[in-house]
Image (cartoon, coloured by chain):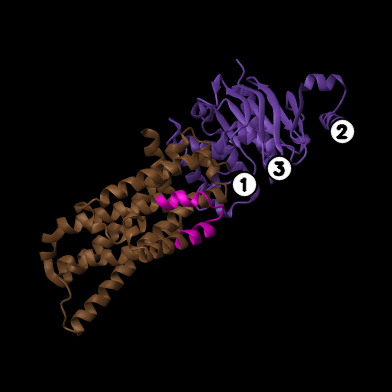
Chain colours: A brown, B purple
Amino acid sequence: MKEIIGSVKNEYRKILARKKSLLLYILTGIIVLGLFVLYYTLSENLNLTVMSGAYYPIWVLGWMMKLILPLFLVMTSIDSMTGEFQDESIKNVLQLPIERHQIYLGKLLAGLIYGAGHLLIILLVSLLGATVIDGFGTFLALPQILSSYVMALFVLGLVIVLISLLSLFFKTSSTALTMSILLYLGLNGLGLYYGFLQVYLPTTYLSMYEKMLNNSMLLYMMSYYIIFSVLGIFKFQTKEV
Amino acid sequence: MSLLKIENLTKTYANGRGIKGLDLEIHHGEVVALLGPNGSGKTTAIKTMLGLLHKNKGCIEIQGYNEETHMKDILRLTGAVIGNPAHYEYMTAFENLVLMQAFFTGITKEDIEAILEKVGLLEFQNEKVKGFSTGMKQRLAIAKAMLHHPPLLILDEPFSGMDIEGRAKIKALLKNEIEKKQLGVLISSHQIFDIEDWVTKVCIINESQWLGTESMIEITKKQLSLEAHYLNRVQEERGHSA
């Protein structure tokens, strides 16, 4: 356990040391702020109440989960996996007295913590916006808002697990990113063309995280977590530098 | 007990290259030079010893720990510089070394500063590695290898890219540590003059084949310089193959 904690700490330290990662945090804050300005301007000018302020943080989360957040985490996961194999800095970690599966899990968990940071920024900025729209009444809906954010984190975790596995098969970060985007589009296309497949596709859950507590989706997601993590650990253990 | 014991180590790539049938033993206080032409299999041998490549067959033991069952212990007992230094360039020299604290108990901030001073990087400790020259990166790699005081050092081309002053500093540091702590060292270098005066044994590899290991005493008895011995052995082997 001590090794995994050490590994998570090191991996998160590395993520934060990259300028790009901090920039993505700032970008998330700016986008959420932009969404608020847009929402507020439209509702004031058109005199429309689209939703109660209490649901505003969930609405913002919905927009961020469509593309931006998964894309940010895909980029971060690829940097910490393919990127390190590409510039051979992975040698540094592999020379430490720690099992390879602990390194891999450390990378996944650090990615998840980084994703949680993005969600926290979205939550705080959108709560602030909701307070402006609807006053402090927003906080009555906090349990519901929080459960949406926790479920979103669960879904983002799956993105990290899937992309980390995928990125082990590519030699350069740019190829890994291109292939990830193509895979995302491909799976979505497959779901649209063959509707019955949707329930089996991991991409389906990106937009359905709110409903997960109520049906069997949680089971599917858990299965994907286990399958992709085990495959990733196996591939990481056999990968040569 | 030997510090490093390798028997019949074989690792081949799809093109047939690699290293075949390497036997090697290193004891405390011994410095073994691993010599061979470019592409002969030196780095492959070193990477395989450290688990970066997976062997086809053979046995690797460090202080009695077998690599198949005790890789963690092997890595704890070994400090290594492997090929071109690859650090986290977006971090400072100090931050690169701090990452080791989580896995080696007892490494303090003072230890990190002390090793950075020994390799001549203390004044650059808060600078991003991205701006370092190749020689500075190499010195940082040596600091990383020595920070946790391992009894065995495996150094693949440790002086590459270093200027004369840096090379002299690192040579003096290594010689001093070997003498003081009776470290075992496996060192590969193309610059024979860098290692000639302090190696105790010489292991030669040519075209993936291990040609044997001889002590410097035996080589000196033949009244040969290390360079002449190496050239003789390699040319002899080429003659046999032809």
Residue B150 image offset from top left, x and y in percent: 55, 28
Say whether residue B95 is left or right of residue B194.
left
Q: Say which amino acid is labelled 2.
A: Gln
* Residue B136, label in figure: 1
- The residue carrying pointer 2 sits among few (fewer than 14), some (14 to 19) or many (20 or more) residues within 10 Å by Cα, namely few
- The residue carrying pointer 3 sits among few (fewer than 14), some (14 to 19) or many (20 or more) residues within 10 Å by Cα, namely few
Q: Say which amino acid is labelled 1.
A: Met
- In this view, the residue in front, A219 or B30, is A219
Callout 3: residue from which chain? B
* Residue B235, label in figure: 2
Residue designated by label 3? B15
Q: Tell me if residue B191 is in the magenta stretch.
A: no
Secondary structure beneath label 3: loop
Q: Which residues are magenta?
A: A162-181
Task: State how far apart marks 1 and 3 are (Cα).
Answer: 35 Å
- In this view, the residue in front, B74 or B7, is B7
